[in-house]
Amino acid sequence: MRFSLSSLTAHVALAIALPVAALSLASTAAFAQQMPPGAKQPGDFPRVKLSIGMYAIDAAVAASDADREQGLMYRTKLQPNEGMLFVFNENAVHCFWMKNTLIPLSIAFIRADGTVTDIDEMQAETTNNHCPTNNGVYALEMSKGWFAAKGIKPGMQIQGLPQPQ
């Protein structure tokens, strides 16, 4: 069998590229679905219906230390109006980071009365601190760009927030 050099190079490149691509896809899928022992599945979090302006939000609630620590880690997607509400027991500056968080998110920091104080954009799998400039008792994470796309800005009110415990 005869091959030209360019034909042989193309076959070798394809023979190498296919297994590498398959390995990359398999490891990404395995990592995205690999949750540490004891981690909650997305459907295991309690949920609350929130609203801001004319928009409804279906939010998972993270109100315990363990739930707040896990947050949206290991998730690979969110539905269009789905997010996670973090509820804290103290009015303070609560900072966030994105370690093991596979999707980029936007975060709104919220006072006890439901007023949004700050909104920040967060890149996936980073350890940069995202801190509000004001004290608050809630934070709401949504898909990156959600707040901007809806015209939601600091000073607006979120309705339906559960009381901190």
Image: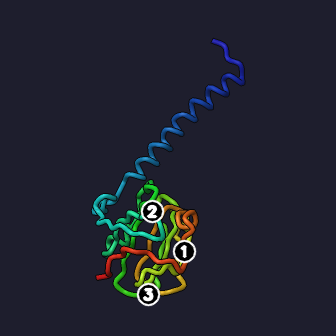
Of the two numbered discs 2 and 1 on the same chain, state the one appearing first in sequence: 2
The residue drawn where x is 37% and y is 71% is 69
- Gap between marks 2 and 1 measured at Cα: 21 Å
Q: In terms of secondary structure, where does tag 3 sit?
A: strand
Q: Within 10 angstroms of label 3, few (less than 14), some, or many (20 or more) residues?
A: some
Q: Within 10 angstroms of label 1, few (less than 14), some, or many (20 or more) residues?
A: many
The residue drawn where x is 41% and y is 64% is 57
Q: Amino acid at mark 3?
A: Ala
- Gap between marks 1 and 3 measured at Cα: 16 Å
Which residue position is annotated with label 2? 100
Kindly check if marks 2 and 3 are in contact, taking CB atoms under 8 A apart as contact. Answer: no
Residue 105 position, x and y percent, is 51, 64
Question: What is the quadrant of the C terminus in the image?
Answer: bottom left
Residue 128 position, x and y percent, is 55, 72
Of the two numbered discs 1 and 3 on the same chain, state the one appearing first in sequence: 3
Tell whether 54 sits left or right of 45.
right
Q: Which mark is residue 119?
A: 1
Residue 115 position, x and y percent, is 47, 81
Quadrant hosting residue 16: top right
Q: In terms of secondary structure, where does tag 1 sit?
A: strand
Q: Amino acid at mark 1?
A: Ile
The residue drawn where x is 71% and y is 19% is 4
Q: Amino acid at mark 2?
A: Asn
- Gap between marks 2 and 3 measured at Cα: 24 Å
Of the two numbered discs 2 and 3 on the same chain, state the one appearing first in sequence: 3
Looking at the image, residue 55 lies above or below residue 156? above
Tell whether 148 sits left or right of 98.
right
The residue drawn where x is 58% and y is 66% is 148
Q: Which mark is residue 92?
A: 3
Tell whether 153 sits left or right of 3.
left
